[in-house]
Amino acid sequence: MTTNLQQPISHSDDTDSLVDLNTPDILQLTKKVESLGDWFHNINLDGVPTAPNHFLGDYPNIKWKHISSAFPDDLKGASVLDVGCNAGFYSIALKQRGAGRVLGVDVDDRYLDQGRFAAQFLHLDIEFEKRTVYEVDSIEGQFDYVLFMGVFYHLRYPLLALDKIVKKVAGRLIFQTMLRGSKHAYPVKPNYDFWNKKIFTDPDFPAAYFIENSYSNDQTNWFIPNRSGAEGMLRSAGLEIVEHPEPETWVCVPNSVQRDGRYILDMELDGTL
């Protein structure tokens, strides 16, 4: 079941410089949305869409309608960490399902300002914090749900980020990445002979394509995996894939992220892995 991101406006003392949140005027609201810059998340603010002309369509709702079933309809106070939260679409959707603490982190002040405004407008208690993906392991505690959506391929050190994020997963990690190349799974073997070069010409073999300059006019698109590459990296981080609700999204649980009580990342960094 999808979550309706349109929330009735309740009475509140909170006000904004351009929008009265008690009695929002569509023209004022539209101007405020536009003043916050270009939005990548299309969020319905009482009938005003924040990104009505998104090149991907109604994004990320086109993703959410497929992955929403991976979450209970009633989250009953569950904690949520949204890594690379952008304007907070997923944070909002899960808060509206009854999540308790919801923390969204991002490095872009524009997106964080958009998220704070959207949450305030919808009268939702969501925390937004400026923090890089490489700093998430310093956040105190773990979370029932950790979202890592649309960030992986923007990272120069994607596995480092993934290994840090798994430290925060108490329940489930919901992972989404852009994919290119083969969309088929690959039957992984425990070892490959040194002289077996044929596997590297198999389009289904796990791979991540490195972009030296720019892809889609974005210089942060560094590594774009194929399906088996994404799944292999998730498993290598000690995660067990339990659901694959849509082609670019996986639901994982931390099955073997530690060895003898130590995380894989820490063992790698001190040379004991």
Image (spheres, grey):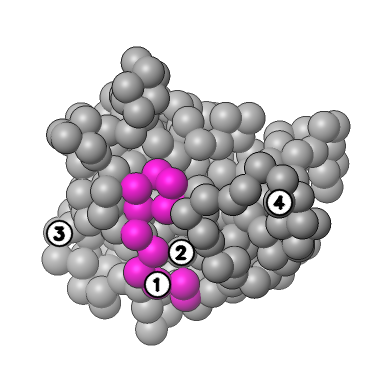
Q: Is residue 261 above or below residue 202?
A: above
- Which residue is the site of mark 2? 250
Spatial CA distance of label 1 from label 2 is 6 Å
Q: What residue type is labelled 1?
A: Glu
In this image, 39 relative to 250: left or right? right
| Contact (Cβ within 8 Å) of mark 3 with mark 4 | no
- Which label is found at residue 243? 1
Spatial CA distance of label 2 from label 3 is 23 Å
At label 4, counting other C-alpha atoms closer than 10 Å, the crowd grade (few under 14, some 14-19, many 20 or more) is few
Marked residue nearer the N-terminal end (4 or 2): 4
- Which residue is the site of mark 3? 77
| Contact (Cβ within 8 Å) of mark 1 with mark 2 | yes
Image quarter (top left, top right, bottom left or bottom right) of the C terminus: top left
Q: Is residue 49 magenta?
A: no
**Where does the magenta region start and end?**
234-245
Q: Residue 185, image x and y in percent?
A: 59, 69
Rendered residue at 67%/59% (across/down): 205
Marked residue nearer the N-terminal end (3 or 4): 3
Spatial CA distance of label 3 from label 4 is 51 Å
Spatial CA distance of label 1 from label 4 is 32 Å
Mark nearer the viewer, 2 or 3: 2
Q: Residue 117, image x and y in percent?
A: 45, 45
Foreground of the two, 152 or 130 = 152
Q: Residue 87, image x and y in percent?
A: 51, 48
Q: Is residue 134 above or below residue 186?
A: above
How many marks can you see?
Answer: 4
Q: Which amino acid does label 2 sit on?
A: Trp
